[in-house]
Amino acid sequence: MRPEVALAPGTGLAVEWAAPAQVGAFMSTRVGGRSTGPWAGWNLGDHVGDDAQTVAEHRAAFGRAIAARPVWLRQVHGVRAIEAASVPDSGMVQADAAWTAAPGVACTVQVADCLPVLLAAGNGRAVGAAHAGWRGLAGGVVEAAVDAVAIAAGCARSELHAWLGPCIGPGQFEVGADVFEAFGGGTAFAPCTHPDGRPRWLADLPALARARLTRAGVERVSGGQWCTVSDTARFYSFRRDGVTGRMAAAIWLRD
């Protein structure tokens, strides 16, 4: 029997924001862990080809480290937001956002270039998380999470705090006309040259998310300065590596 694995202090990103003290938040990196090969590090994705026992050990250690029950989603780049406490320990629900007002339950999203967005009500009564790739972001996944948290907390959207985690950065996210048109263009897109002559742009995913949050009424937004593609030591990146692991961002209310 292998010894229990533990998530070492300092291996995650500090979630620095002005959320209430009863809100816990954590963002993992790839540092540490038992995964090997293309998943080397602290892989939390159970759908990417890694050893199932290793991933299960990593997920159990993740839960112990945050002292809450992570609710893992089957993410499909959609806009559905679910109440995390309604998902049983043995279950997994297809959704790309989660919210809860129940202490000890962690809304959790997995990423490896997509943007994790954490939300906390200023009155400390509800929290939420969204998995925001470009499709989900364009479709309204952030707005769905914002609405759910504000309603659960009984507060205005302007009273929410938002934190943006690591994602593919604006110098790496080359996109085509489909993405450009999905957002209606704008200053978050910089034209770039592609060898095949097709119109291409470099998209700023955090800037697109900030714009969506602002339009939804969220005024306090922090984070978003990390690029998963550029930082090979700390982050998994699907765009960079293809076969790779997944990190996780979690938010919960402390008991």
Image: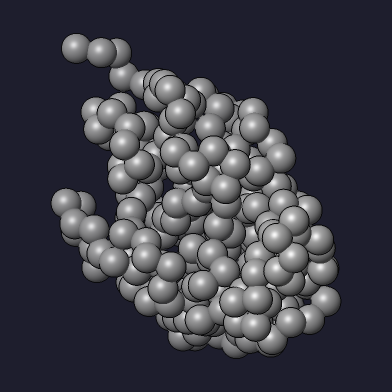
Q: Is residue 222 visible to the viewer in this orientation of the structure? A: no
Q: Position of residue 9 (x, y in %)?
A: 56, 27
How is this picture coloured?
A: one colour
How many marks are shown on the rendered structure? 0
Q: Position of residue 220 (x, y in %)?
A: 73, 72
Quadrant showing the N terminus? top left
Q: Residue furthest left?
A: 90
Identify the residue at image location x=69%, y=86%: 184
Comparing 118 with 175, the one in front is: 175
Quadrant showing the C terminus? bottom left
Identify the residue at image location x=24%, y=28%: 53
Q: Position of residue 52 (x, y in %)?
A: 25, 32
Q: Is residue 54 visible to the viewer in this orientation of the structure? A: yes
Comparing 226 with 156, the one in front is: 226
User: Toward which corner of the image does residue 39 lie, by quadrant?
Assistant: top left
Comparing 91 with 111, the one in front is: 111
Q: Position of residue 236 (x, y in %)?
A: 55, 39
Q: Is residue 113 above or below residue 201?
A: above
Q: Is residue 168 above or below residue 6?
A: below
User: Toward which corner of the image does residue 98 lie, by quadrant?
Assistant: bottom left
On the rendered structure, is 123 left or right of 245? right
Identify the residue at image location x=49%, y=63%: 131
Q: Is residue 81 above or below residue 195?
A: below
Comparing 187 with 7, the one in front is: 187
Identify the residue at image location x=24%, y=58%: 92
Q: Residue furthest front?
A: 196
On the rendered structure, is 87 left or right of 187? left
